[in-house]
Image (cartoon, coloured by chain):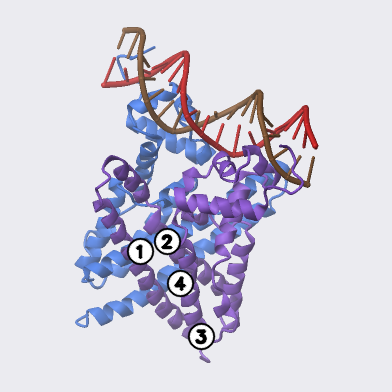
Chain colours: A blue, B purple, C brown, D red
Amino acid sequence: MARPRNPLLSRDRIVAAALELVDTEGLPALSTRRLAAVLGVSGPSLYNHFATKDALLDAVVDEVLGEVDLSMWAQVDKETWADALTRWARSYRSALVAHPNLIPVLAQGPGRRTNALRLADAVFGGLVDAGWPRGDATRIGALMRYLVFGSALGSFAGGFVDDQQIYAADYPHLDQAHLLAEHRRSIDEGAFETGISALMEGLTLQYGRTNPAG
Amino acid sequence: MARPRNPLLSRDRIVAAALELVDTEGLPALSTRRLAAVLGVSGPSLYNHFATKDALLDAVVDEVLGEVDLSMWAQVDKETWADALTRWARSYRSALVAHPNLIPVLAQGPGRRTNALRLADAVFGGLVDAGWPRGDATRIGALMRYLVFGSALGSFAGGFVDDQQIYAADYPHLDQAHLLAEHRRSIDEGAFETGISALMEGLTLQYGRTNPAG
DNA sequence: ACCTGAACACCGTTCAAGT
DNA sequence: ACCTGAACACCGTTCAAGT
């Protein structure tokens, strides 16, 4: 075929197909050849649009991070920062949980992804606007990410996906494993909410000490 | 050579060599062939001791988790649970940070690793002994793990290790990247400590409401 | 039981060749 | 500029063969 007059691929099309492949068939299914096949194209074609597979994965991650709601940071003050933090963390967690198979990659860190920086910036700016010292704002943003990623990772990665596949292969009727996975999922959601509550209480106390004018 | 009268390999020797390989050359360097070469043996030999590479990785992770101090859980009560939790979390984090290249694998979840279960059990038991309801104890244990893993992951994984390698390859004298990585490391340590403090304050308040007999 | 070499079915990536 | 097939240097894993 060689070069068609209308390009067969675009970065957006590749990213969308990659995300769907990971969502439906799991992370190991995302090889350059499999992805190219899904797109009706030969393997090396992808390298006209992404320098490496890692760059492609970065773009996929960025797409998912783009789904996180940041509107709550539009205007925050001493009354609303804790609520904004809570709503932001929940939206963040939802975005991750919507793509469980991708979470190990998402957890691999902010790196140089634009949307990751956008997220960090919104939180940092909001907390500073609300009167938090810059150093505290940085740490609180990081802290909330730990909670979000930890509880998202805990539910999905965790060797239990693997177990389920192993069990499902050997014992198609064994769903005790599935029940246990569900149990862990609810533990992780509960732990997330427990963490949010305890952190907001602790941080509110700290905020009161930092801003005595409160 | 075929079968020697004294086995060349043992699970322990393989695990030790794998951990050293990961520590010194990074996770991607750990292939069955490279590891076998380090051990002076041919690739497939490993399969006499571990069913899959994943099983081997599990054993490596378990080894690292075995380094976490649990002695603080020997006797906890209403006065000491928060201190035990803090000391345990710090020891846990130290064990992870000692093997930065392995953290992405460690983060992949508890799974069926004996030492992971040992850890979870100690914390759960200690918190229950101290008077926490079982549901709360489960969530608090999970919560602390999020904090530990999140702050450990943040520092090391995070696309920055990669960046550094790329930079180091192209610009052997560029250490601005290294400086930035150091900065992130201190942010993550600070965020970890901020999280511990805020959580202990929040949990102490909650404990007081749960155990009014205080 | 434990190691070997050969082999299978994959990888990510490069590159000359085509239009 | 963008796609192709062929090729390179890897993977994890299986398996018959050796002792």
Query: In this orientation, does residue A203 appear?
Result: yes
| Residue ID at (38%, 35%) | A15
In the rendered image, which residue does mark 4 sit on? B90
What crowding class fits label 2: few (fewer than 14 Cα within 10 Å), some (14-19), or many (20 or more)?
many
Between discs 2 and 1, the one toward the N terminus: 2
The residue to which callout 3 is attached is B80
On screen, residue B77 versus residue A175, left or right, reads left
Callout 2 amino acid: Ala
How far across and down, in percent of the image, does residue A35 sit?
Answer: 46, 30
Quick one: label 1 or label 3, which is nearer the N terminus? 3
Sequence-wise first label, 3 or 4: 3
Along the polypeptide, which appears first: circle 2 or circle 3? 3
**Of residues A183 and B150, the one drawn nearer to the viewer in this rendering:** B150
Q: Are marks 3 and 4 in contact (CB under 8 Å)?
A: no
Question: Where is residue A77 shown, x and y percent of the image?
Answer: 22, 69
Chain of the residue that carries numbered disc 3 in the rendered image:
B
- Quickly name the residue at label 2: B152
Q: Are marks 4 and 1 on the same chain?
A: yes
4 and 1 marks in contact (CB < 8 Å): no
Q: What number is the disc on residue B188? A: 1
Q: Are marks 2 and 1 in contact (CB under 8 Å)?
A: yes
Same chain, labels 1 and 3:
yes
Q: At 33% across and 29% down in the image, what residue appears?
A: A49
Is residue A71 in view?
no
Which quarter of the figure is the N terminus of chain B placed in? top right
Q: Is residue A208 above or below residue A41?
A: below
Q: Distance between the residues labelled 2 and 4?
A: 11 Å
Q: Which residue is drawn at 47% across and 58% down?
A: B99
